[in-house]
Amino acid sequence: MQFYLPIFAFLVFYLIFTNFLLKKFNFSLDKEATDENHKSLLRQDNSTPLSGTFYFLPIILLLFYNLDLQIIVCCSLLFLLGLFADLKILTSYKLRLCFQFLLISSLFLVSEDIKIDTRILFINDLMNYDLTRILICTFFFMVLINGFNLIDGTNCLCSLNFLIISFFLYLLIKNSNTSFIYGELKIFILILASSIFLIFNFFGKNFLGDGAAYGLSFLFGYLLLKISMMNNNISPYFIANLLWYPAFENLFSIMRRNFSKSNNYLPDNNHLHQMIFKFFKKKKIFKKNFILSSVVGISINSILFLNYFIGFNYFNNSKIQIMLSIHNLHYACDERCLAAPSSKLVFAGNTISNDRTL
């Protein structure tokens, strides 16, 4: 315990100092954010610093310096790619997707040992061919990193989800009898860093930003994939269940926008967490948006945590994991129907976005 106290104190000081500098240089959420903007629920004021990249990237580089060089380079570049988006240097969503594809596909081109085991024979056979392996793995990671960026639209949703995933990653290392080279200690320090960030995020005092959403989701995706590859007792479907929510939100948003004939590349406020926010906003439970935003984020993660906990107790049983996956999809669709009772509201983006009650 005495070993962790100085680390905890340093991380608190480091985050406070980072937030101070970013506020001083006015690196904060969009001042022009409106109800149409997916970041509008996050603000307590116009000076909420985008501190995720500046806080987490140095920590990741210090903790995981022993990762393969290509993993470190790809992760760092994804952090920077998102940072350029936060800085409004790279505003084109299409260009951002192109850079993501080039970075991630290049990684799998040089890392021939990284494969996704689906335990479905014909798909695993496809993984033996470089082209299909690269395309499938690239698709998986692009869905993942953009999904986490999409759910980073309310306080505590993305940041708490990262914390929960790191917690279960820690438990997997301890319980899977795997000699994991990245170590329990490093994951525990990452849990500490995420916990401190989450506390500030709850009060609307900081924000992950695109950079941290891209970089952290890639890192967690890689670490979970790696530990699954190193231990056949860990079902790949448990890994999928840990990461299902951002992936679902991303893919569902694409289908919703295609259904409503809206632009796939422009942000909107029609995601699950935003519809739940609107639903409770009408109940007038909380006066301040940023508090309600945090409550929504914690509520969704509480249900996700219960699902993860059940899955963890059967992490080696693929049949149970598949049943949980089916339940997850059913639950997410039910939540959308509760938040927007009309099916028209669920799918027609224009109908929801015209509601200016936020």
Image (cartoon, helix red, strand yellow):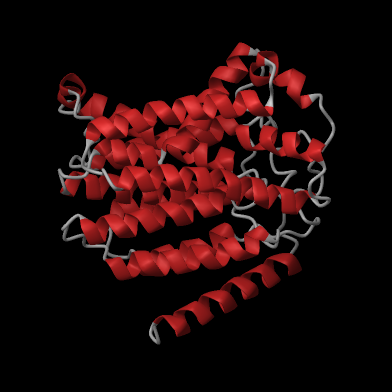
Q: Is residue 284 above or below residue 332?
A: below
- Residue at (21% x, 22% y) in the render: 123
- Residue at (65% x, 20% y) in the render: 346
User: The C terminus is located in which quarter?
Assistant: top right
Asked whether, in this view, residue 318 is left or right of residue 80, the answer is: left
Quarter of the image holding residue 138? top left
Q: Is residue 170 above or below residue 338?
A: below
- Residue at (58% x, 51% y) in the render: 83
Of residue 332 and residue 214, the one placed in the foreground of this image is: 332
Residue 122, image x, y percentages: 17, 19
Residue 59, image x, y percentages: 45, 67
Res. 183 in view: yes
Asked whether, in this view, residue 271 is left or right of residue 303, the answer is: right
Of residue 328 and residue 246, the one placed in the foreground of this image is: 328
Res. 80 in view: no
Residue 76, image x, y percentages: 43, 54
Residue 174, image x, y percentages: 24, 61
Q: Is residue 8 above or below residue 39?
A: below
User: The N terminus is located in which quarter?
Assistant: bottom left
Q: How many marks?
A: 0
- Residue at (76% x, 33% y) in the render: 36
Of residue 246 and residue 164, the one placed in the foreground of this image is: 164
Asked whether, in this view, residue 156 is left or right of residue 173, the answer is: right
